[in-house]
Image (cartoon, rainbow, N blue to C red):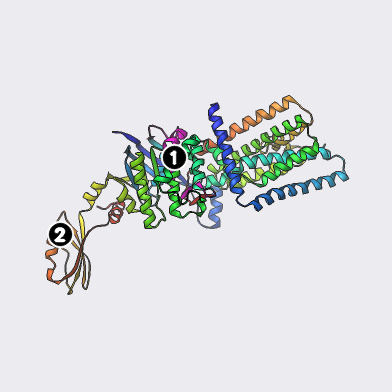
Amino acid sequence: MLMEAKKEFKFILLSIKYNLAREMTNKATFLTNIIFMILNNAAFLVEWIIFFSIKDNIGGYVLKDVILLWALASGTYAICFIFFGAVQELPNLIMNGKIDSFLVQPKNVLISILISKTKVSAIGDLIYSYILLLIYGISFKNFLLFTLFIIIGGIITTAIATIFGSLAFYITKADTIAGNIMSTMLNFGTYPDGIFKGAIRILFYTIAPISFAIYMPLHIIKEFNIVNLLIVIGYTILIVSIAFLIFYKGLKKYSSGNLMSARV
Amino acid sequence: MNNVIEVKNLSKTFKVKVKEKGFIGSLKSIIKPKYKTIKAVNNISFNVEKGEIIAFIGPNGAGKSTTIKMLTGILYNNKGSISVMGIDPTKKRKKLAYEIGTVFGQKEQLWTHLTPYDNFKFFGAIYDIPEYVVEKKIKEFIEIFELSEFINTPVRNLSLGQRIRCEIVASLIHEPKILFLDEPTIGLDPVVKENIRTLIKRMNKEYKTTIFLTSHDVGDIEKLCKRVIIINKGEIVLDDSMENLKYHYLNKKIIEVKMKEKVNLDDKDGITILKDKGYNLKLEVDIKKTSISEALKLIDSDKIIDINISNVPLESIITNIYKGEK
Protein backbone atom coordinates (compact mmCIF):
# COMPACT_ATOMS: atom_id res chain seq x y z
CA MET A 1 0.00 0.00 0.00
CA LEU A 2 2.79 2.42 1.03
CA MET A 3 4.86 1.34 -1.96
CA GLU A 4 1.85 1.92 -4.22
CA ALA A 5 1.37 5.44 -2.78
CA LYS A 6 5.07 6.18 -3.26
CA LYS A 7 4.92 5.11 -6.91
CA GLU A 8 1.77 7.18 -7.47
CA PHE A 9 3.41 10.26 -5.87
CA LYS A 10 6.54 9.82 -8.01
CA PHE A 11 4.31 9.64 -11.09
CA ILE A 12 2.45 12.83 -10.05
CA LEU A 13 5.73 14.75 -9.74
CA LEU A 14 6.97 13.43 -13.09
CA SER A 15 3.70 14.43 -14.76
CA ILE A 16 3.94 17.95 -13.37
CA LYS A 17 7.58 18.16 -14.47
CA TYR A 18 6.52 17.29 -18.02
CA ASN A 19 3.54 19.68 -17.83
CA LEU A 20 5.90 22.50 -16.90
CA ALA A 21 8.32 21.46 -19.65
CA ARG A 22 5.43 21.81 -22.10
CA GLU A 23 4.52 25.25 -20.80
CA MET A 24 8.16 26.37 -20.91
CA THR A 25 8.32 25.70 -24.65
CA ASN A 26 7.81 29.43 -25.01
CA LYS A 27 9.78 31.18 -22.28
CA ALA A 28 8.25 34.64 -22.87
CA THR A 29 4.66 33.36 -22.55
CA PHE A 30 5.60 31.30 -19.53
CA LEU A 31 7.10 34.25 -17.62
CA THR A 32 4.50 36.86 -18.63
CA ASN A 33 1.72 34.50 -17.55
CA ILE A 34 3.21 34.31 -14.07
CA ILE A 35 4.11 38.00 -13.75
CA PHE A 36 0.74 39.27 -14.99
CA MET A 37 -1.12 36.97 -12.61
CA ILE A 38 0.82 38.50 -9.68
CA LEU A 39 0.05 42.03 -10.94
CA ASN A 40 -3.60 41.14 -11.55
CA ASN A 41 -3.97 39.86 -7.98
CA ALA A 42 -2.16 42.89 -6.58
CA ALA A 43 -4.74 45.18 -8.22
CA PHE A 44 -7.49 43.64 -6.06
CA LEU A 45 -5.48 44.31 -2.92
CA VAL A 46 -5.20 47.99 -3.89
CA GLU A 47 -9.02 48.07 -3.96
CA TRP A 48 -9.15 46.67 -0.41
CA ILE A 49 -6.59 49.24 0.80
CA ILE A 50 -8.92 51.97 -0.54
CA PHE A 51 -11.95 50.33 1.19
CA PHE A 52 -10.11 50.20 4.51
CA SER A 53 -9.06 53.85 4.19
CA ILE A 54 -12.79 54.64 4.33
CA LYS A 55 -13.88 52.03 6.90
CA ASP A 56 -11.74 50.38 9.60
CA ASN A 57 -13.68 47.13 9.81
CA ILE A 58 -15.47 45.22 7.05
CA GLY A 59 -17.42 42.12 8.13
CA GLY A 60 -15.21 41.72 11.20
CA TYR A 61 -11.99 41.89 9.11
CA VAL A 62 -9.22 44.49 9.27
CA LEU A 63 -6.79 45.02 6.36
CA LYS A 64 -4.34 42.45 7.79
CA ASP A 65 -7.08 39.78 7.82
CA VAL A 66 -7.98 40.50 4.21
CA ILE A 67 -4.31 40.13 3.27
CA LEU A 68 -4.32 36.67 4.90
CA LEU A 69 -7.66 35.87 3.23
CA TRP A 70 -6.23 36.71 -0.21
CA ALA A 71 -3.06 34.76 0.57
CA LEU A 72 -5.13 31.68 1.42
CA ALA A 73 -7.46 32.09 -1.56
CA SER A 74 -4.57 32.57 -4.02
CA GLY A 75 -2.61 29.69 -2.50
CA THR A 76 -5.63 27.37 -2.59
CA TYR A 77 -6.31 28.25 -6.22
CA ALA A 78 -2.60 27.79 -7.02
CA ILE A 79 -2.34 24.30 -5.51
CA CYS A 80 -5.53 23.23 -7.30
CA PHE A 81 -4.35 24.41 -10.73
CA ILE A 82 -0.64 23.59 -10.48
CA PHE A 83 -1.19 20.01 -9.37
CA PHE A 84 -4.68 19.24 -10.66
CA GLY A 85 -4.93 21.67 -13.58
CA ALA A 86 -7.16 19.42 -15.70
CA VAL A 87 -9.99 19.46 -13.14
CA GLN A 88 -11.75 22.28 -15.01
CA GLU A 89 -11.69 20.17 -18.17
CA LEU A 90 -12.96 17.01 -16.51
CA PRO A 91 -16.62 17.34 -17.66
CA ASN A 92 -15.55 18.02 -21.25
CA LEU A 93 -13.14 15.09 -21.26
CA ILE A 94 -15.94 12.83 -20.01
CA MET A 95 -18.58 14.18 -22.41
CA ASN A 96 -16.30 13.92 -25.44
CA GLY A 97 -15.04 10.46 -24.52
CA LYS A 98 -11.44 11.56 -24.11
CA ILE A 99 -10.36 9.61 -21.05
CA ASP A 100 -9.59 6.36 -22.89
CA SER A 101 -5.82 6.81 -22.76
CA PHE A 102 -5.94 7.20 -18.96
CA LEU A 103 -8.05 4.06 -18.59
CA VAL A 104 -5.47 1.80 -20.23
CA GLN A 105 -2.69 2.90 -17.88
CA PRO A 106 -1.95 1.08 -14.61
CA LYS A 107 -2.45 4.20 -12.53
CA ASN A 108 -5.36 5.75 -10.67
CA VAL A 109 -7.58 7.10 -13.47
CA LEU A 110 -8.89 10.15 -11.65
CA ILE A 111 -5.46 11.27 -10.44
CA SER A 112 -3.93 10.65 -13.88
CA ILE A 113 -6.57 12.86 -15.50
CA LEU A 114 -6.33 15.65 -12.92
CA ILE A 115 -2.54 15.93 -13.06
CA SER A 116 -2.38 15.87 -16.86
CA LYS A 117 -2.38 19.66 -17.05
CA THR A 118 -0.76 22.53 -15.14
CA LYS A 119 -2.02 26.09 -15.35
CA VAL A 120 1.06 28.29 -15.54
CA SER A 121 -0.64 31.42 -14.18
CA ALA A 122 -1.26 29.45 -10.96
CA ILE A 123 2.49 29.64 -10.28
CA GLY A 124 1.95 33.43 -10.14
CA ASP A 125 -0.84 32.84 -7.63
CA LEU A 126 1.43 30.69 -5.48
CA ILE A 127 4.26 33.28 -5.45
CA TYR A 128 1.70 36.00 -4.69
CA SER A 129 0.21 34.01 -1.80
CA TYR A 130 3.60 33.72 -0.06
CA ILE A 131 4.38 37.42 -0.70
CA LEU A 132 1.10 38.23 1.09
CA LEU A 133 1.97 35.85 3.94
CA LEU A 134 5.25 37.73 4.29
CA ILE A 135 3.33 41.03 4.49
CA TYR A 136 0.84 39.49 6.99
CA GLY A 137 3.65 38.41 9.26
CA ILE A 138 5.55 35.21 8.79
CA SER A 139 6.62 32.86 11.58
CA PHE A 140 7.59 29.19 11.53
CA LYS A 141 4.16 28.20 12.85
CA ASN A 142 2.32 30.48 10.39
CA PHE A 143 4.38 29.17 7.50
CA LEU A 144 3.65 25.54 8.34
CA LEU A 145 -0.06 26.10 8.98
CA PHE A 146 -0.40 28.26 5.86
CA THR A 147 1.31 25.66 3.66
CA LEU A 148 -0.86 22.90 5.13
CA PHE A 149 -4.04 24.93 4.57
CA ILE A 150 -3.36 25.89 0.96
CA ILE A 151 -2.70 22.21 0.22
CA ILE A 152 -5.95 21.27 2.01
CA GLY A 153 -7.84 24.11 0.29
CA GLY A 154 -6.48 23.03 -3.11
CA ILE A 155 -7.54 19.44 -2.47
CA ILE A 156 -11.05 20.48 -1.30
CA THR A 157 -11.51 22.73 -4.38
CA THR A 158 -10.34 19.90 -6.66
CA ALA A 159 -12.66 17.41 -4.92
CA ILE A 160 -15.70 19.69 -5.29
CA ALA A 161 -14.87 20.36 -8.95
CA THR A 162 -14.48 16.60 -9.47
CA ILE A 163 -17.85 15.84 -7.86
CA PHE A 164 -19.71 18.33 -10.05
CA GLY A 165 -17.56 17.53 -13.09
CA SER A 166 -18.44 13.84 -12.71
CA LEU A 167 -22.09 14.74 -13.34
CA ALA A 168 -21.01 14.68 -16.99
CA PHE A 169 -21.27 10.89 -16.80
CA TYR A 170 -25.03 11.34 -16.32
CA ILE A 171 -26.03 14.66 -17.90
CA THR A 172 -24.89 16.84 -20.76
CA LYS A 173 -23.63 20.36 -20.09
CA ALA A 174 -22.32 19.38 -16.65
CA ASP A 175 -19.36 21.63 -17.44
CA THR A 176 -21.59 24.69 -16.85
CA ILE A 177 -22.63 23.46 -13.38
CA ALA A 178 -19.05 22.57 -12.41
CA GLY A 179 -17.82 25.92 -13.78
CA ASN A 180 -20.41 27.86 -11.76
CA ILE A 181 -19.51 26.08 -8.52
CA MET A 182 -15.80 26.72 -9.12
CA SER A 183 -16.47 30.44 -9.80
CA THR A 184 -18.60 30.67 -6.65
CA MET A 185 -15.81 29.17 -4.55
CA LEU A 186 -13.09 31.32 -6.06
CA ASN A 187 -15.02 34.60 -6.05
CA PHE A 188 -16.77 34.41 -2.66
CA GLY A 189 -13.58 33.13 -1.02
CA THR A 190 -11.92 36.53 -1.40
CA TYR A 191 -14.53 38.39 0.72
CA PRO A 192 -14.71 38.44 4.55
CA ASP A 193 -17.11 35.75 5.78
CA GLY A 194 -18.67 38.23 8.20
CA ILE A 195 -20.47 40.06 5.37
CA PHE A 196 -22.45 36.96 4.42
CA LYS A 197 -25.57 36.19 6.46
CA GLY A 198 -28.32 33.56 6.57
CA ALA A 199 -28.88 30.98 3.85
CA ILE A 200 -25.78 31.87 1.88
CA ARG A 201 -23.64 30.64 4.76
CA ILE A 202 -25.24 27.19 4.38
CA LEU A 203 -23.88 27.24 0.82
CA PHE A 204 -20.36 27.75 2.20
CA TYR A 205 -20.58 24.58 4.27
CA THR A 206 -22.24 22.46 1.59
CA ILE A 207 -22.00 22.73 -2.19
CA ALA A 208 -19.35 25.49 -2.21
CA PRO A 209 -17.42 24.66 0.99
CA ILE A 210 -15.32 27.83 1.25
CA SER A 211 -15.70 27.69 5.03
CA PHE A 212 -13.59 24.50 5.20
CA ALA A 213 -11.21 25.57 2.43
CA ILE A 214 -10.55 29.18 3.44
CA TYR A 215 -12.49 30.71 6.36
CA MET A 216 -11.79 28.08 9.04
CA PRO A 217 -8.07 27.90 8.09
CA LEU A 218 -7.92 31.71 8.32
CA HIS A 219 -9.33 31.71 11.83
CA ILE A 220 -7.03 28.83 12.87
CA ILE A 221 -3.96 30.74 11.67
CA LYS A 222 -5.17 33.80 13.57
CA GLU A 223 -5.98 31.80 16.68
CA PHE A 224 -4.91 28.16 16.78
CA ASN A 225 -7.68 25.70 17.59
CA ILE A 226 -6.91 21.97 17.42
CA VAL A 227 -10.60 20.93 17.24
CA ASN A 228 -11.21 23.15 14.22
CA LEU A 229 -8.00 21.88 12.61
CA LEU A 230 -9.20 18.28 13.01
CA ILE A 231 -12.63 19.23 11.62
CA VAL A 232 -10.96 20.71 8.50
CA ILE A 233 -8.72 17.65 8.04
CA GLY A 234 -11.68 15.28 8.65
CA TYR A 235 -13.83 17.17 6.13
CA THR A 236 -11.03 16.99 3.55
CA ILE A 237 -10.78 13.21 3.90
CA LEU A 238 -14.56 12.92 3.63
CA ILE A 239 -14.94 15.13 0.55
CA VAL A 240 -12.01 13.45 -1.24
CA SER A 241 -13.55 10.02 -0.55
CA ILE A 242 -16.91 11.24 -1.90
CA ALA A 243 -15.20 12.63 -5.02
CA PHE A 244 -13.49 9.29 -5.74
CA LEU A 245 -16.72 7.39 -5.05
CA ILE A 246 -18.83 9.54 -7.39
CA PHE A 247 -16.21 9.55 -10.15
CA TYR A 248 -15.76 5.77 -10.10
CA LYS A 249 -19.50 5.17 -9.94
CA GLY A 250 -19.91 7.44 -12.95
CA LEU A 251 -17.05 5.75 -14.78
CA LYS A 252 -19.23 2.66 -15.16
CA LYS A 253 -21.49 4.80 -17.36
CA TYR A 254 -18.61 6.17 -19.44
CA SER A 255 -19.40 5.80 -23.11
CA SER A 256 -16.05 6.78 -24.65
CA GLY A 257 -16.07 8.31 -28.13
CA ASN A 258 -14.47 8.29 -31.53
CA LEU A 259 -13.42 11.91 -31.85
CA MET A 260 -9.95 12.49 -33.22
CA SER A 261 -7.76 13.79 -30.41
CA ALA A 262 -4.20 14.64 -29.55
CA ARG A 263 -2.39 14.99 -26.25
CA VAL A 264 -1.01 18.53 -26.57
CA MET B 1 -5.42 -24.59 -26.31
CA ASN B 2 -3.71 -21.55 -24.89
CA ASN B 3 -6.29 -18.79 -24.96
CA VAL B 4 -5.20 -15.30 -23.97
CA ILE B 5 -8.62 -13.78 -24.69
CA GLU B 6 -11.92 -15.48 -23.87
CA VAL B 7 -15.19 -13.70 -24.62
CA LYS B 8 -18.53 -15.31 -23.80
CA ASN B 9 -21.98 -13.93 -24.71
CA LEU B 10 -20.73 -10.35 -24.55
CA SER B 11 -23.29 -7.55 -24.95
CA LYS B 12 -23.16 -3.80 -24.65
CA THR B 13 -26.02 -1.34 -24.99
CA PHE B 14 -25.96 2.44 -25.01
CA LYS B 15 -28.80 4.69 -23.95
CA VAL B 16 -29.05 7.60 -26.37
CA LYS B 17 -31.19 10.70 -25.92
CA VAL B 18 -33.61 11.29 -28.78
CA LYS B 19 -34.40 14.89 -29.61
CA GLU B 20 -37.05 16.10 -32.00
CA LYS B 21 -35.85 18.69 -34.48
CA GLY B 22 -35.92 22.44 -33.91
CA PHE B 23 -36.24 24.68 -30.88
CA ILE B 24 -39.56 23.13 -29.75
CA GLY B 25 -37.84 19.72 -29.88
CA SER B 26 -35.11 21.06 -27.57
CA LEU B 27 -37.74 22.35 -25.13
CA LYS B 28 -39.62 19.03 -25.17
CA SER B 29 -36.40 17.12 -24.50
CA ILE B 30 -35.79 19.21 -21.37
CA ILE B 31 -39.33 18.67 -20.02
CA LYS B 32 -39.77 15.05 -21.05
CA PRO B 33 -36.54 13.52 -22.32
CA LYS B 34 -36.89 10.45 -24.54
CA TYR B 35 -34.24 7.78 -24.82
CA LYS B 36 -33.62 4.87 -27.12
CA THR B 37 -31.40 1.88 -26.46
CA ILE B 38 -28.80 0.94 -29.03
CA LYS B 39 -27.32 -2.55 -29.04
CA ALA B 40 -23.69 -1.90 -29.95
CA VAL B 41 -22.54 -5.46 -29.28
CA ASN B 42 -25.02 -8.31 -29.19
CA ASN B 43 -24.13 -11.63 -27.59
CA ILE B 44 -20.74 -12.30 -29.16
CA SER B 45 -18.33 -15.08 -28.19
CA PHE B 46 -14.80 -15.82 -29.39
CA ASN B 47 -11.34 -16.86 -28.16
CA VAL B 48 -7.88 -15.72 -29.19
CA GLU B 49 -4.84 -17.93 -28.81
CA LYS B 50 -1.41 -16.83 -27.68
CA GLY B 51 0.75 -15.45 -30.50
CA GLU B 52 -2.13 -15.04 -32.98
CA ILE B 53 -2.49 -12.02 -35.24
CA ILE B 54 -6.22 -11.62 -35.53
CA ALA B 55 -8.21 -9.18 -37.62
CA PHE B 56 -11.41 -7.91 -36.02
CA ILE B 57 -13.19 -6.12 -38.81
CA GLY B 58 -16.55 -4.70 -39.77
CA PRO B 59 -18.18 -1.61 -41.29
CA ASN B 60 -18.46 1.66 -39.35
CA GLY B 61 -20.73 1.31 -36.32
CA ALA B 62 -20.47 -2.51 -36.36
CA GLY B 63 -19.23 -2.71 -32.75
CA LYS B 64 -15.48 -3.17 -33.33
CA SER B 65 -14.25 -0.28 -31.21
CA THR B 66 -16.85 -0.97 -28.51
CA THR B 67 -15.58 -4.56 -28.27
CA ILE B 68 -11.93 -3.50 -28.16
CA LYS B 69 -12.77 -0.94 -25.47
CA MET B 70 -14.49 -3.58 -23.36
CA LEU B 71 -11.50 -5.91 -23.76
CA THR B 72 -9.11 -3.18 -22.61
CA GLY B 73 -11.21 -2.05 -19.63
CA ILE B 74 -12.30 1.29 -21.08
CA LEU B 75 -15.98 0.35 -21.24
CA TYR B 76 -18.08 -1.83 -18.97
CA ASN B 77 -20.11 -4.63 -20.54
CA ASN B 78 -23.83 -5.11 -19.80
CA LYS B 79 -23.89 -8.88 -20.19
CA GLY B 80 -21.49 -11.75 -20.68
CA SER B 81 -17.93 -12.29 -19.54
CA ILE B 82 -14.46 -11.26 -20.67
CA SER B 83 -11.16 -12.76 -19.67
CA VAL B 84 -7.94 -11.21 -20.98
CA MET B 85 -4.80 -13.01 -19.75
CA GLY B 86 -7.11 -14.54 -17.14
CA ILE B 87 -8.12 -11.07 -15.89
CA ASP B 88 -11.59 -9.54 -15.88
CA PRO B 89 -11.04 -6.00 -17.30
CA THR B 90 -13.91 -4.51 -15.29
CA LYS B 91 -12.56 -5.80 -11.98
CA LYS B 92 -8.77 -5.61 -12.31
CA ARG B 93 -8.21 -2.79 -14.79
CA LYS B 94 -4.82 -1.76 -13.38
CA LYS B 95 -3.49 -5.32 -13.31
CA LEU B 96 -4.64 -5.80 -16.90
CA ALA B 97 -2.88 -2.59 -18.01
CA TYR B 98 0.52 -4.18 -17.26
CA GLU B 99 -0.34 -7.08 -19.58
CA ILE B 100 -1.72 -5.23 -22.60
CA GLY B 101 -0.72 -2.42 -24.92
CA THR B 102 -3.08 -0.24 -26.94
CA VAL B 103 -2.73 1.94 -30.00
CA PHE B 104 -5.71 3.92 -31.22
CA GLY B 105 -4.86 5.28 -34.67
CA GLN B 106 -7.20 8.20 -34.19
CA LYS B 107 -6.09 9.14 -30.68
CA GLU B 108 -2.63 10.19 -29.65
CA GLN B 109 -1.21 8.88 -26.44
CA LEU B 110 2.17 10.54 -26.84
CA TRP B 111 2.86 14.03 -25.50
CA THR B 112 3.37 16.12 -28.63
CA HIS B 113 5.82 18.60 -27.08
CA LEU B 114 8.16 15.85 -25.91
CA THR B 115 10.58 13.85 -28.03
CA PRO B 116 9.91 10.11 -28.57
CA TYR B 117 12.84 9.44 -26.19
CA ASP B 118 11.23 11.47 -23.36
CA ASN B 119 7.83 9.95 -24.14
CA PHE B 120 9.23 6.43 -23.85
CA LYS B 121 10.80 7.37 -20.50
CA PHE B 122 7.45 8.77 -19.32
CA PHE B 123 5.67 5.58 -20.37
CA GLY B 124 8.36 3.62 -18.50
CA ALA B 125 7.49 5.59 -15.34
CA ILE B 126 3.78 4.92 -15.87
CA TYR B 127 4.52 1.19 -15.81
CA ASP B 128 6.96 1.50 -12.85
CA ILE B 129 9.89 0.19 -14.88
CA PRO B 130 13.33 1.01 -13.42
CA GLU B 131 15.13 3.71 -15.40
CA TYR B 132 18.09 1.56 -16.44
CA VAL B 133 15.67 -1.03 -17.87
CA VAL B 134 13.82 1.69 -19.83
CA GLU B 135 17.13 3.01 -21.21
CA LYS B 136 18.06 -0.50 -22.34
CA LYS B 137 14.63 -1.01 -23.95
CA ILE B 138 14.82 2.33 -25.79
CA LYS B 139 18.23 1.39 -27.24
CA GLU B 140 16.80 -1.95 -28.37
CA PHE B 141 13.74 -0.29 -29.96
CA ILE B 142 15.85 2.34 -31.75
CA GLU B 143 17.76 -0.45 -33.40
CA ILE B 144 14.92 -2.87 -34.16
CA PHE B 145 12.37 -0.28 -35.31
CA GLU B 146 14.86 2.17 -36.90
CA LEU B 147 14.01 5.23 -34.82
CA SER B 148 17.47 6.84 -34.62
CA GLU B 149 16.64 9.53 -37.21
CA PHE B 150 13.87 11.13 -35.16
CA ILE B 151 14.27 9.86 -31.59
CA ASN B 152 15.15 13.37 -30.36
CA THR B 153 12.64 15.34 -32.46
CA PRO B 154 9.48 16.59 -30.68
CA VAL B 155 6.52 14.42 -31.61
CA ARG B 156 4.61 17.41 -33.02
CA ASN B 157 7.31 17.75 -35.71
CA LEU B 158 7.15 14.11 -36.81
CA SER B 159 5.35 12.89 -39.91
CA LEU B 160 2.16 10.89 -39.34
CA GLY B 161 3.96 7.64 -40.18
CA GLN B 162 6.81 8.34 -37.77
CA ARG B 163 4.30 9.30 -35.07
CA ILE B 164 2.28 6.10 -35.44
CA ARG B 165 5.50 4.10 -35.36
CA CYS B 166 6.42 5.83 -32.07
CA GLU B 167 2.88 5.26 -30.72
CA ILE B 168 3.30 1.53 -31.35
CA VAL B 169 6.79 1.45 -29.83
CA ALA B 170 5.56 3.37 -26.74
CA SER B 171 2.89 0.75 -26.24
CA LEU B 172 5.61 -1.94 -26.16
CA ILE B 173 7.77 -0.39 -23.45
CA HIS B 174 6.26 -2.64 -20.76
CA GLU B 175 6.46 -5.73 -22.98
CA PRO B 176 2.71 -6.38 -23.22
CA LYS B 177 1.53 -9.89 -23.96
CA ILE B 178 -1.33 -8.61 -26.12
CA LEU B 179 -1.38 -5.54 -28.32
CA PHE B 180 -4.69 -3.98 -29.34
CA LEU B 181 -4.36 -1.94 -32.52
CA ASP B 182 -7.39 0.09 -33.51
CA GLU B 183 -6.89 1.20 -37.11
CA PRO B 184 -3.15 1.76 -36.83
CA THR B 185 -2.67 2.57 -40.53
CA ILE B 186 -5.47 5.10 -40.88
CA GLY B 187 -4.45 8.06 -43.04
CA LEU B 188 -1.02 6.66 -43.96
CA ASP B 189 0.47 6.45 -47.45
CA PRO B 190 1.17 2.98 -48.94
CA VAL B 191 4.91 3.05 -48.17
CA VAL B 192 4.40 3.97 -44.51
CA LYS B 193 1.57 1.42 -44.24
CA GLU B 194 3.99 -1.24 -45.39
CA ASN B 195 6.55 -0.07 -42.77
CA ILE B 196 3.95 -0.30 -40.01
CA ARG B 197 2.93 -3.78 -41.16
CA THR B 198 6.57 -4.90 -41.09
CA LEU B 199 6.84 -3.48 -37.56
CA ILE B 200 3.73 -5.37 -36.43
CA LYS B 201 5.02 -8.61 -37.94
CA ARG B 202 8.40 -8.12 -36.28
CA MET B 203 6.75 -7.47 -32.91
CA ASN B 204 4.79 -10.68 -33.24
CA LYS B 205 7.91 -12.61 -34.23
CA GLU B 206 10.49 -11.08 -31.86
CA TYR B 207 8.34 -10.71 -28.74
CA LYS B 208 5.63 -13.32 -29.43
CA THR B 209 3.06 -10.57 -28.89
CA THR B 210 -0.55 -11.49 -29.63
CA ILE B 211 -1.98 -8.87 -31.98
CA PHE B 212 -5.67 -7.92 -31.99
CA LEU B 213 -6.18 -5.64 -34.96
CA THR B 214 -9.09 -3.63 -36.28
CA SER B 215 -8.71 -2.00 -39.66
CA HIS B 216 -10.66 -0.91 -42.70
CA ASP B 217 -7.61 -1.58 -44.81
CA VAL B 218 -7.85 -4.94 -46.55
CA GLY B 219 -4.07 -4.84 -47.11
CA ASP B 220 -3.51 -4.90 -43.34
CA ILE B 221 -5.76 -7.91 -42.96
CA GLU B 222 -4.46 -9.82 -45.96
CA LYS B 223 -0.79 -9.24 -45.20
CA LEU B 224 -0.82 -9.62 -41.43
CA CYS B 225 -3.60 -11.85 -40.20
CA LYS B 226 -4.10 -15.57 -40.20
CA ARG B 227 -7.57 -15.34 -38.71
CA VAL B 228 -10.47 -12.98 -39.34
CA ILE B 229 -13.51 -12.17 -37.23
CA ILE B 230 -16.11 -10.11 -39.04
CA ILE B 231 -18.64 -8.24 -36.96
CA ASN B 232 -21.71 -6.47 -38.30
CA LYS B 233 -24.55 -4.78 -36.43
CA GLY B 234 -23.04 -5.98 -33.15
CA GLU B 235 -22.99 -9.66 -34.13
CA ILE B 236 -20.23 -11.92 -35.38
CA VAL B 237 -20.99 -12.89 -38.96
CA LEU B 238 -17.78 -14.80 -39.63
CA ASP B 239 -14.95 -16.24 -37.54
CA ASP B 240 -12.55 -18.18 -39.74
CA SER B 241 -8.95 -18.51 -40.86
CA MET B 242 -7.78 -16.32 -43.71
CA GLU B 243 -7.06 -19.49 -45.68
CA ASN B 244 -10.64 -20.74 -45.28
CA LEU B 245 -12.03 -17.31 -46.05
CA LYS B 246 -10.15 -17.29 -49.32
CA TYR B 247 -10.97 -20.93 -50.09
CA HIS B 248 -14.70 -20.55 -49.48
CA TYR B 249 -15.22 -17.10 -50.78
CA LEU B 250 -12.65 -16.94 -53.57
CA ASN B 251 -14.71 -19.28 -55.72
CA LYS B 252 -15.13 -16.61 -58.31
CA LYS B 253 -12.60 -15.50 -60.90
CA ILE B 254 -12.66 -12.42 -63.04
CA ILE B 255 -11.64 -12.70 -66.71
CA GLU B 256 -10.90 -9.43 -68.49
CA VAL B 257 -10.38 -9.66 -72.25
CA LYS B 258 -9.46 -7.10 -74.91
CA MET B 259 -10.68 -8.22 -78.35
CA LYS B 260 -9.79 -7.36 -81.92
CA GLU B 261 -13.47 -7.35 -82.85
CA LYS B 262 -16.75 -6.69 -81.09
CA VAL B 263 -18.35 -9.79 -79.53
CA ASN B 264 -21.75 -10.39 -78.03
CA LEU B 265 -22.05 -12.92 -75.21
CA ASP B 266 -24.92 -13.94 -72.96
CA ASP B 267 -24.87 -15.14 -69.32
CA LYS B 268 -24.53 -18.91 -68.88
CA ASP B 269 -24.70 -21.17 -65.86
CA GLY B 270 -21.72 -20.09 -63.72
CA ILE B 271 -20.65 -17.33 -66.08
CA THR B 272 -21.87 -13.75 -65.62
CA ILE B 273 -21.08 -11.01 -68.09
CA LEU B 274 -20.08 -8.03 -65.97
CA LYS B 275 -19.06 -5.74 -68.80
CA ASP B 276 -19.54 -6.00 -72.54
CA LYS B 277 -18.47 -2.70 -73.99
CA GLY B 278 -17.29 -2.96 -77.55
CA TYR B 279 -13.86 -4.50 -77.57
CA ASN B 280 -13.62 -5.01 -73.81
CA LEU B 281 -15.19 -7.95 -71.99
CA LYS B 282 -15.39 -8.69 -68.29
CA LEU B 283 -16.72 -12.06 -67.09
CA GLU B 284 -17.21 -13.47 -63.64
CA VAL B 285 -16.76 -17.24 -63.46
CA ASP B 286 -18.13 -19.28 -60.57
CA ILE B 287 -15.58 -22.11 -60.47
CA LYS B 288 -17.88 -24.24 -58.30
CA LYS B 289 -20.30 -24.44 -61.25
CA THR B 290 -18.00 -24.28 -64.25
CA SER B 291 -14.36 -24.00 -65.17
CA ILE B 292 -12.15 -21.25 -66.57
CA SER B 293 -11.54 -23.31 -69.71
CA GLU B 294 -15.32 -23.58 -70.30
CA ALA B 295 -15.55 -19.82 -70.07
CA LEU B 296 -12.63 -19.33 -72.45
CA LYS B 297 -14.31 -21.61 -75.00
CA LEU B 298 -16.94 -18.86 -75.42
CA ILE B 299 -14.31 -16.52 -76.77
CA ASP B 300 -12.55 -16.93 -80.11
CA SER B 301 -8.88 -17.17 -79.04
CA ASP B 302 -7.64 -15.82 -82.42
CA LYS B 303 -9.35 -12.53 -81.73
CA ILE B 304 -7.85 -11.95 -78.28
CA ILE B 305 -5.37 -9.07 -77.94
CA ASP B 306 -4.90 -9.27 -74.19
CA ILE B 307 -6.31 -11.37 -71.33
CA ASN B 308 -6.16 -11.16 -67.56
CA ILE B 309 -7.54 -13.68 -65.03
CA SER B 310 -7.73 -12.59 -61.41
CA ASN B 311 -9.39 -13.35 -58.09
CA VAL B 312 -12.29 -11.30 -56.82
CA PRO B 313 -10.66 -8.64 -54.60
CA LEU B 314 -10.79 -9.48 -50.89
CA GLU B 315 -12.39 -6.09 -50.35
CA SER B 316 -15.43 -7.16 -52.44
CA ILE B 317 -15.63 -10.46 -50.56
CA ILE B 318 -15.66 -8.65 -47.22
CA THR B 319 -18.22 -6.13 -48.47
CA ASN B 320 -20.45 -9.02 -49.54
CA ILE B 321 -20.05 -10.67 -46.13
CA TYR B 322 -21.01 -7.36 -44.48
CA LYS B 323 -24.14 -7.40 -46.63
CA GLY B 324 -24.85 -10.99 -45.71
CA GLU B 325 -24.16 -12.37 -49.19
CA LYS B 326 -21.95 -15.32 -50.09
Name which residue lies at 53% across and 44% down: A94
- Graded by Cα atoms within 10 Å as few (under 14), some (14 to 19) or many (20 or more), the crowding at tag 2 reads some
The CA distance from mark 2 to mark 1 is 54 Å
Place of residue B198 in the rendered image (x, y in percent of width and height, measured from the top left): 35, 49
In the picture of the structure, the residue carrying the numbered disc 1 is B137
Mark 2 or mark 1: whose residue is earlier in sequence: 1
Quadrant in which residue B76 is drawn: top left
- The reply to whether residue B235 is in sight is no
- Graded by Cα atoms within 10 Å as few (under 14), some (14 to 19) or many (20 or more), the crowding at tag 1 reads some
Q: What element carries label 2?
A: helix
Name which residue lies at 73% across and 40% down: A129
Place of residue A161 in the rendered image (x, y in percent of width and height, measured from the top left): 62, 40
For residue B292, which numbered disc appears in the image?
A: 2
On screen, residue A145 versus residue B175, left or right, reads right
Q: Extreme bottom residue here?
A: B261
On screen, residue B284 versus residue A255, left or right, reads left
On screen, residue B152 versus residue B87, left or right, reads right
User: Which region is colored magenta?
Assistant: B84-113
Instruction: Look at the image and say whether residue B310 sits in the magenta stretch.
Output: no
Q: Which of B38 and B104 is in front in this view?
A: B104
Give the amino acid type for the residue marked by disc 1 in the picture.
Lys
Give the chain of mark 1.
Answer: B
Q: Where B272 falls versus A122 (above or below)?
A: below
Place of residue B104 in the rendered image (x, y in percent of width and height, measured from the top left): 44, 47
Q: Where A202 falls versus A26 (above or below)?
A: above
Q: Are marks 2 and 1 in contact (CB under 8 Å)?
A: no
Instruction: Look at the image and say whether residue B94 sits in the magenta stretch.
Output: yes
Give the chain of mark 2.
Answer: B
Name which residue lies at 37% across and 56% down: B191
